[in-house]
Each structure stands twice: as C-alpha cells, then as structure tokens.
Image (cartoon, rainbow, N blue to C red):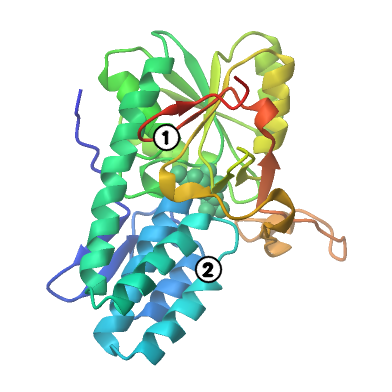
Amino acid sequence: MDTMNDIRPIIWNEENKELILIDQRKLPAKLEYFTCKTYKDVALAIKDMVVRGAPAIGVSAAYGMALAELENSSTDFIKKAYDELKLTRPTAVNLFWALDKCMDSHKNGISLLDEAKRIHEEDVELCKKIGKLGQTLFEDGDVILTHCNAGALATSAYGTALSVIRFARYAGKNISVISDETRPRLQGAKLTCFELNYENIPVTAISDNTAGFLMKQGKVDKIIVGADRILADYHVFNKIGTYSLAILAKYHNIPFYVAAPYSTFDFENSVGNIEIEQRSDEEVTHIDGVRIVAEGVPVINYAFDCTPPELITAIITEDKIIYPNK
Ligand SMILES: CSC[C@@H](O)[C@@H](O)C(=O)COP(=O)(O)O
C-alpha cells in the first residue's frame, strides 16, 4: 500500500543551490514554479502564500535559513534571516519549530542545508506514517469531508488529512471526499480539488455553507482536517471555518478527526496567547481580483480559528491516535 505520491511542492535544486516551489497562488489554472535564490525570496513566498500549509511553511523556512547560510555564514546574518522569516506568518507553529531547529544547528556548527534536507525528508516520512495509522479509522465506502488543503501541497508529500485519505485508498477502501471551498482564499476549491482529482480520488466540491445540510441528510460519514498548531490541552488552531465544522459534526454525531505531525504541537503556549493571523480585506472583498463587496464596507478576515478538545474525536499523529475526551 506504499504508493508513491508525486505531488512535491518543495524541491531543492542542488546544482543551482536554489529552492523551487510550486506557485500555489496560480493553481489550478497554471502549474508554475517560483524560484527562491535568497532567504528574502523564501520570506516573500511564505508571506504571499506561494507556499502555504503548516508543514510546508516550516520546511520552506528551513531552506530559507540554508540559503542565508550559503549567502553569508556569520551568526549576525543568520540571526537576521531568522528574525525576518519569523515575521512571515504568525499562527502555524511549524514555522517557529523549524527556525529554532536551524538556529540550534547553526550554533552547533551543523550545516543548515543538511538540516533543511533532514527536516524535508522527515516531513515526508511523518506524513506517510500519519496516513498509514489514520487510515485504520476509515471504512470502505466512507464519504469524508475536509476543509482547506491539508494535502501534499501543504506538506512535503502526501499531506496530513489527505494522507489519511490517500492511504485508505491505497488499502483498497472505496473512499470519496467532499471538499469545502474554504473562503476566503479557496484552498479547498483550488488546491484540494486539484490534488485529489489529479490522483483520481473522487472529490466533490461544495460551498462552505452546504456542509451542515449534507450532514443533516446523512451524506457525511467522517470529517478530517489538518492543523496549524495543537496545544498541550488539545486545542486545535486550523483554517477559519474548522470550528464551525466541528460544532456541526458534534450536533450531527459525526466523528471529527485532526491529523498532524509532532512539529505542529506547541507545549509552551496556552489558548490566550496565540496570535491568530488577520489578512488583508481584499481576500474577502474580492474574488480573483473582482470586487464582490461594496466599497467602504468594513471587513473581518481571520485566517484561523481555534477548536476546543471537547469537539474533537481524535488527533492522528505519526505514532499514535490521541482521544482528547477519553
Ligand atoms: C497540513 S496543512 C494544515 C494546515 O496548515 C491547513 O489546514 C491550513 O489551515 C492551511 O492554511 P493556509 O492559510 O493555507 O496556510
């Protein structure tokens, strides 16, 4: 059941010493690549969401640190890169995890390119393990609803939530997927539908506000999402709309799963001190450059929300399935 997943959003070009990213802003219309030659290019790519998804942000940031070291290996310069990369996005803890790991390696005289490659390879293995373990929770014929994109595009390969779906399919289970469109940036419609369709995994797109009605009709068997940060008490920060879905799942008695590797866990902070990213008004007022909200109307645009543990059936990691309420 170990099928190769060939969607690889992050590629290190050894010959030219550059980072090549699938430009996720362009999908599904165009498959284009964005080349990063300096850490500043990587910072821009993360900020502008060329690359997105918590594990993919962490891996890219590690290559950003490696590019900084190739440019100038002085500790002052590495620290400058670290500080700039840290400011790119605030909520996904994988970013800080990867940057801290690289800073420690630099202090210990370990090559940051080697460190970035290790983080990258490890992420592939973690995603595979999550998929293999998590797929045991799915049954033949299940219809699985997912939100945003927690797929290969959001990681180094396979994904987290979508890895569970992939490995259930590799195990011969007839699983089909319902993908929330995931306003405002439409990662579900644009990325999850592209990714699953590319691999011939049956996927149906819905607008976000259709989810509850499908659940009421008994058309959703399980829900699985990824995470940007999971706290020690199992509060889960993920794409805006995850909390609403979890409440709907509770009301309709549908299992609600979260899949994430250890690099997404934050054992230091508590709910009150996590910064929830707020992005530009334009993501809400416009769709693909076309204004849909009257000029002058104020906007609220949180990129993430927080789901409490009592709404979560299980959290699937690479080595165990955690039941927060047992
Ligand atoms: C495996 S990715 C997990 C999460 O990062 C994902 O669900 C998500 O919320 C992505 O948000 P994004 O704003 O697209 O970076």
In depth, the one of 209 and 302 nearer the eye is 302
The kind of residue tagged 2 is: Lys
Q: Is residue 258 visible?
A: yes
Quadrant including the C terminus? top right
Picture coordinates of residue 106 (x, y %)? 31, 77
Q: Is residue 136 left or right of residue 310?
A: left
- The residue pinned by badge 1 equals 317
Q: Is residue 213 left or right of residue 187?
A: right
Q: Measuring 33% from the left and 82% from the top, which residue is drawn there?
A: 68
In depth, the one of 140 and 129 nearer the eye is 129
Report the Cα–Cα distance between label 2 and label 1.
27 Å
Picture coordinates of residue 3 (x, y %)? 20, 30
Dot 2 alpha-carbon crowd within 10 angstroms: few under 14, some 14 to 19, many 20 or more? some
The kind of residue tagged 1 is: Thr
Q: Is residue 140 left or right of residue 243?
A: left
- The residue pinned by badge 2 equals 47
Picture coordinates of residue 112 (x, y %)? 26, 73
Q: Measuring 58% from the left and 43% from the top, which residue is drawn there?
A: 232
Q: Nearer the viewer, mark 2 or mark 1?
A: 1
